[in-house]
Amino acid sequence: MTRITHILIAAVTITMLTQCYVNDSRQEVDIPLDNICVGDIAFRRGEGITSTIVLYKDAEGQYSHVGVVAKSDSGLVVVHAVPGDDPNQEGVDIVRAEFLNHFFASDKATKGEIMRLALDSTQQNAINRYALEKARQKIEFDHQYDLDDTTRLYCTELLHNAFDRAGINITEGRISNLSVPGKQYDLIMPSDIHKNANLKTVFIF
């Protein structure tokens, strides 16, 4: 676990202790796949330690994780950079593609939203190619949150780069500053994307 993670875990311990336990009776969501398109943005709010840290530091945010919808040979998937707080993922922190019902499974998401930016087919294709390429390469998660390092990616950085390939600045220039003892991080939070005024909700739970 990285130094920044240790520091932030200490900062949110009290917050974590006040959270409710997971409701095991929560039902799986019924996602309207016929209404989901390549390039749609999938936001979720999770319950793991990494999600708690993100929500603690992203005071204006509703969501702790984000991915982009792509079309693979197997159908629609969400491509996202996973920080590795899922015990079913064998501790591997990589960019991966998974079906929407897995991305929004009840053990991973307490709430979620799919949003859409108006895209033409050329833009969709550019996003799709980039996202699937990074999943195929199994790019490692960037625990240093360095936007200048494209050899590793964190979840919002993946989205930023995918839309950049389509000529779109999905954050509209927003960037957040994270301060920890001895270090300053300029990074993209989920809310920096969610605030895009041109995004429209197509599904929410």
Image (tube, helix red, strand yellow):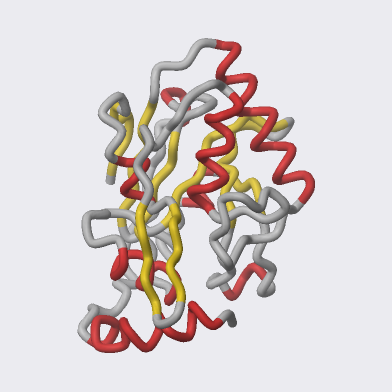
Work out which quarter of the rendered image holds the N terminus and state it.
Answer: bottom right
Placement of 77 over or under 89, stated as above or below = above
Q: Residue at x 24, y 79 (%)?
A: 19
Image check: 187 left or right of 86? left
Q: Residue 59: percent from the left, percent from the top?
A: 23, 61
Q: Nearer the viewer, residue 165 or 76?
A: 165
Q: Residue at x 61, y 50 (%)?
A: 148
Splitting the image into 4 quarters, where does residue 55 fall?
bottom left
Placement of 61 over or under 57, stated as above or below = above
Splitting the image into 4 quarters, where does residue 47 fall?
bottom left
In the image, farthest residue toward the front: 182
Marks counted in the figure total 0
Q: Nearer the viewer, residue 104 or 43?
A: 43
Image check: 134 left or right of 115? right
Q: Nearer the viewer, residue 170 or 174?
A: 174
In the image, farthest residue toward the right: 137
Q: Residue 28: percent from the left, percent from the top?
A: 39, 54
Q: Residue 100: percent from the left, percent from the top?
A: 51, 43
Splitting the image into 4 quarters, where does residue 16 fall?
bottom left
Q: Nearer the viewer, residue 58 or 93?
A: 58
Q: Residue 135: percent from the left, percent from the top?
A: 71, 46
Q: Residue at x 68, y 48 (%)?
A: 150
Q: Residue at x 59, y 44 (%)?
A: 79
